[in-house]
Image (spheres, rainbow, N blue to C red):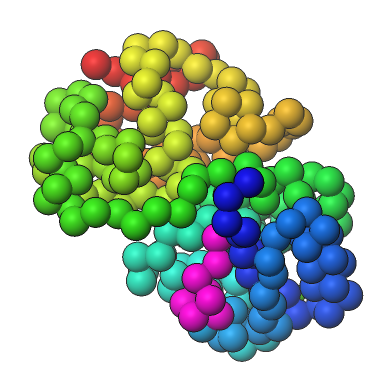
C-alpha cells in the first residue's frame, strides 16, 4: 500500500463517529472528524481527505448541501452518503447532487469498509494543465477523449468535470465499445459490489448524470446508449 489515505467523517452522533474511527484506523486509514455540516465543509477543504463519509441529518448544514457545495467548488473527492433506513428519496437525491455512493443505516461495518475501499481506489494525483492533458488524451468516440493518466475527460478539447464514479463508469464502458452491460454487470464491474439488490437504480442515476455532462443533447445521447431491457453500452 502506498501513502496512507485519509477519511473525513461528518456525523453528529458521537458513538457512530467513534465506531467509524476505530474501524477505519484499524484498516489503516487516517481519520478526521466534523460534527456539523459547516465544519464538515471547511474540513473537506482544509484537510483534503481521500474520501468523505457524510451523514444527511446534520446541525447547521445538511449533508446534501455539503455535498452540493463541494461539487460547486469543483471538488471531486469521493463522497459516501450515510442515509437513514427506508429513506429512498434520500438515496436518489444524494446521487443526483453528486455523491458517489450511499450506505443505509444501520450498516454493517464490513460493508462500509468494503465501500470505502471501492470508492477510494483511484490514486490521488495532480492533474496536469488541461491543454497538455487534452493533447495527450486518447480519442474514444467523436469529440470525446479520455486521458487515463490524468483521469480527465474532454469533449472538443474542453475538460468535463466528472465524479470518480462517473469517470469509472465512462472508462469501463468506453474500453468495451458496443458491448452491452446489464445494470447488475455494471454494479459488479464498476461499483465492485458483490451484493446488488435494489441498488441497480444507482446505475441509472449515474448514467443520467454522466449523459448530462458528456452529451451535447442528453435526451438524445450518442455516446452512452440504452439497449432496452438489456443494459447500457458505449457506442462507437
Ligand atoms: Ca445525524
Instruction: Identify the magenta region.
Output: 43-50
Residue 105 in view (yes/no): no
Relative to 57, residue 122 above or below = above
In reply to whether residue 167 is colored magenta, the answer given is no
Residue drawn 86% across the image and 49% down it? 108
Relative to 22, residue 173 above or below = above
Viewport quadrant of the C terminus: top left
Residue drawn 14% across the image and 48% down it? 132
**Front-most of 227 and 168?**
168
Relative to 218, residue 93 above or below = below
**Front-most of 146 and 104?**
146
Residue 72 at x, y = what percent? 36, 69
- The picture quadrant for ligand 1 comes to bottom right
Q: Quadrant of residue 228?
A: top left
Dominant secondary structure, magenta: helix
Residue drawn 14% across the image and 32% down it? 143
Q: How many marks?
A: 0
Residue 68 in view (yes/no): yes
Q: Quadrant of residue 23?
A: bottom right
In reply to whether residue 45 is colored magenta, the answer given is yes
Residue drawn 12% across the image and 40% down it? 135
Residue 58 at x, y = what percent? 68, 79
**Front-most of 188 and 121?**
121
Residue 27 in the figure: left or right of residue 212: right
Amino acid at each position: 500500500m502506498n501513502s496512507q489515505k485519509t477519511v473525513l467523517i461528518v456525523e453528529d452522533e458521537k458513538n457512530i463517529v467513534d465506531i467509524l474511527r476505530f474501524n477505519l484506523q484499524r484498516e489503516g486509514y487516517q481519520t478526521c472528524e466534523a460534527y456539523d455540516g459547516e465544519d464538515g465543509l471547511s474540513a473537506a477543504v482544509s484537510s483534503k481527505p481521500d474520501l468523505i463519509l457524510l451523514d444527511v441529518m446534520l446541525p447547521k448544514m445538511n449533508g446534501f448541501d455539503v455535498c452540493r457545495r463541494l461539487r460547486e467548488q469543483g471538488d471531486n473527492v469521493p463522497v459516501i452518503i450515510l442515509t437513514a433506513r427506508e429513506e429512498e428519496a434520500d438515496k436518489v437525491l444524494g446521487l443526483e447532487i453528486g455523491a458517489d455512493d450511499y450506505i443505509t443505516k444501520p450498516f454493517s461495518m464490513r460493508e462500509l469498509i468494503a465501500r470505502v475501499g471501492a470508492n477510494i481506489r483511484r490514486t490521488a494525483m495532480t492533474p496536469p494543465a488541461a491543454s497538455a492533458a487534452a493533447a495527450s488524451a486518447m480519442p474514444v468516440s467523436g469529440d470525446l477523449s479520455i486521458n487515463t493518466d490524468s483521469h480527465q475527460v474532454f469533449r472538443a478539447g474542453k475538460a468535463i468535470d466528472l465524479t470518480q464514479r462517473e469517470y469509472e463508469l465512462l472508462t469501463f464502458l468506453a474500453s468495451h465499445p458496443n458491448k452491452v452491460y446489464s445494470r447488475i454487470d455494471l454494479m459488479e464491474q464498476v461499483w465492485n459490489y458483490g451484493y446488488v439488490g435494489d441498488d441497480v437504480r444507482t446505475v441509472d442515476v449515474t448514467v443520467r448524470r454522466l449523459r448530462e455532462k458528456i452529451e451535447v443533447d442528453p435526451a438524445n445521447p450518442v455516446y452512452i446508449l440504452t439497449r432496452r431491457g438489456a443494459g447500457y453500452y458505449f457506442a462507437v
